[in-house]
Image: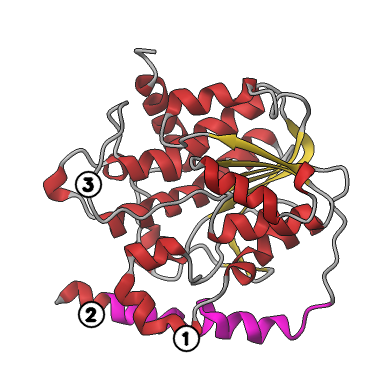
Amino acid sequence: MLRALGSLLFYGRFLRSFSALGFQRRSTEWEEFAPDFSGQRWLITGATGGIGRAAALTANRYGATVLALARNTDKLEALRKDAAHPDRIKAVSVDMASIADVRALAGHSEISTGAIDVLVNNVGVLLNDFETTEEGLEASFATNLLGPFALTEQLHDDNLLDPDGIVINVSSGGMYGTPLKLEAMNCRDEKNYDGMAAYAMHKRAQVELTRYWNAQWQGKPAVHVMHPGWVDTEGVKTALPGFRNALKRILRDAEQGADTILWLADQRPAPAEEGIWLDRELQPEHEFAFTRRTDHAAGDLAHFLQARARSATAGQ
């Protein structure tokens, strides 16, 4: 009962901003958007569905070569066929929940051939049922956070991120519901697992990782975090059917959700000290006082993830 009431208050607070209503209101003031991504190499995780697919197809249409990462080879082939320039879609099949597989990506023939101008850490899952990976990690933690963290760090260490490029972390408005936590993000007890809470914690952590990487790399490349609003994706359909049924008439489509990714890649604003992008505007990281109450800083999070990544591959 208390959770249902909390959800109602949360959704009521953000309805006008995160739904298609907010996008439509803000977009009336925008100039025509026609970027030129010619010659750029993009790497997008979770590229075969929803927001990632929309970003991949649009970036490709405007000239980019897109390294499209996803698990399903059939969906990767469908993405290539639907692209305006199929020869500039480079399909890379990988399970982002496998840290060993992610570590190996920097040596992949399609990835290692040149610097990446735009890295979009888009992959994300909300799992209602508890799952673990072969490496002993909670599956959504591995997919949403540890895999993308390991990939980004590996690409940077191997000098595969263009210093003048941009890293875009795709978070979620759900992060407004939690402070930064560490151990709780990788729940190991099925009885205490809460998929929605886990997802929110992972998305809050992405905001903190943005701060960490900007401090470590001094903006070379620049790192930004955005959230797409409430988008009608297959993930929402399967993980949050009640939410979708109640709001499906005003949920954003995938192109609206991907818009700020493409705008950031085109405009390349200077890294912000804090904040999260929504509809081409920098918004506060916190909407509730309790989400500031944490014992951890961005550096603590990075050290926690580095340790988990090492332990996941220790037996490899």
Element carrying mark 3: loop
Please name the residue shown 48% across and 25% down the image: 101
Whether residue 134 appears in magenta in the rendering, the answer is no
Please name the residue shown 54% across and 48% down the image: 75
Q: Position of residue 192 (x, y in %)?
A: 15, 49
| 9 in relation to 103, above or below | below
State whether the magenta stretch is mostly helix, strand or loop.
Answer: helix
Image mark for residue 5: 2
Name the residue that disc number 3 marks: 130
Whether residue 21 appears in magenta in the rendering, the answer is yes
| 196 in relation to 2, above or below | above
Element carrying mark 1: helix
Q: Amino acid at mark 3?
A: Phe
Image mark for residue 249: 1
Verify CB contact (< 8 Å) between mark 2 and mark 3. Answer: no
Taking the view exactly as shown, the residue that stands out farthest to the top is 315
| 51 in relation to 156, above or below | below
Q: Give the image's coloring scheme.
A: secondary structure
**Spatial distance from mark 2 to mark 3, Cα to Cα?**
24 Å
Which segment is the magenta one?
A: 7-31
| Left or right: 271 as drawn, with respect to 140 | right
| Left or right: 312 as drawn, with respect to 36 | left
**Taking the image as drawn, is residue 112 in sight?**
yes
Please name the residue shown 44% across and 63% down the image: 234
**Spatial distance from mark 1 to mark 3, Cα to Cα?**
30 Å
Task: Give whichever of discs 1 and 2 has the lower sequence position.
Answer: 2
Element carrying mark 2: helix
